[in-house]
Image: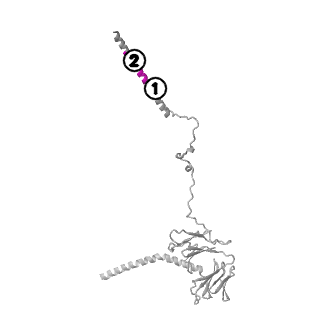
Amino acid sequence: MRSVLRTSIVTAALAGALLAPAATALAATAPQSATAVTAAVSANDRYAGEPVYVGNGMVAVLRNETEGPEAWIRYVGDQWKPGDDYMVHVVALVSRQQTTAEAHGASFELTKAQTASPVLVVTTKGVAKSYPLPKGKTGQVCSAEKTQIIGGGMNAKLSMSPDGPRAEIWAAGEDTAFRILDRGFPALPESAGIIARIVNPSGAAPGFEWKTQGGDTPLGRTSFPALPKGCKPNYKVTEEKATDKPAPKPQPTAAASAKPASATTAADVKPQTGAQTVVVPQGGVAAGAEIAAEDTDNTVTLAAGGGLIAILAGLGAAWTARNRTARNRG
């Protein structure tokens, strides 16, 4: 019984040790998988529409959303039937900006593009067929777009509409966007391996930054196209505060502008043109006067001493002469 119990405990420990790395790996990859799924759903939402088979192995995905009427022509093969996947290889696109295209022996034209009821006309071997698009809004086209090469075999399709800026990251040779950025999801996560982000996504003039190569490669920057005149965003425009601007230089103060005493130059010193006056402090004498007085006293003392010596010498001589005269008389 004890042997069986020990065997069970050892087996459980081994299983835990073997399964722990796998559980850790799954936990680490879970956020990235969720991001990928979210991006895929966003991509499908952007390009989803009403697919109709137009012949020669192609379907036209008909859309009429905030971007305006669009017909994405995709090659699906001759065996395609309604209900099958249509998010495959794009061969052409017609829209209000580009109303005609050709692919696989057929021509495509978006007619009545400026109305609420645009129609796709597909002509094959001289035979034309019409496919109405979903009804939309009439009037002005309130969207603009441009393509920016960002390196690493990728480009970004930047568009501006009343819904705000939108950046589609495309890899060369791919049929769907690698990632889609907008006001709700303005930047790629670090796990993406590249930098791509919308700067000031809710501002009046949003920008786009990217870096797809390592090393000292600087960030690339460009602006989104402006909304056409007369078009307005359908959200509140709020400007984000810039964090990369240098701090303003401090203004010099009165104390800082004052010259220190040690900084006085020769030009600041004015030459004396008149007689100098020595001010003697009360209760004392000036240093120069004190030295002069001391020198005078020394000179007088020496002179008095010399005179005394001369008088004594004269008295001595007279005394000696007087003694000699007295001896001669006696």
Q: Answer yes or no: is residue 36 visible.
A: yes
Q: Tell me where residue 233 appears, x and y as whole percent.
A: 64, 71
User: Is the residue marked by circle 2 packed among few (<14), some (14-19), or many (20+) residues within 10 Å?
Assistant: few
Q: Quadrant of the N terminus?
A: bottom left
User: Is the residue marked by circle 1 packed among few (<14), some (14-19), or many (20+) residues within 10 Å?
Assistant: few
Where disc 1 sits, the SS reads helix
What residue does disc 2 label?
Answer: 315
Q: Quadrant of the C terminus?
A: top left
Q: Tell me where residue 323 appears, x and y as whole percent.
A: 35, 14
Query: In screen coordinates, is 66 left or right of 316?
Result: right
For the residue pair 6 and 50, the one nearer the viewer reads as 50
CA gap, disc 2 and disc 1: 23 Å
Q: Tell me where residue 222 appears, x and y as whole percent.
A: 59, 70
Bounds of the magenta span?
305-320
Where disc 2 sits, the SS reads helix
Residue 237 in magenta stretch: no
For badge 1, the amino acid type reads: Val
What residue does disc 1 label?
Answer: 300
Identify the image quadrant of residue 266: top right
Q: Answer yes or no: is residue 168 visible.
A: no
Q: Residue at x 37, y 16 (%)?
A: 320
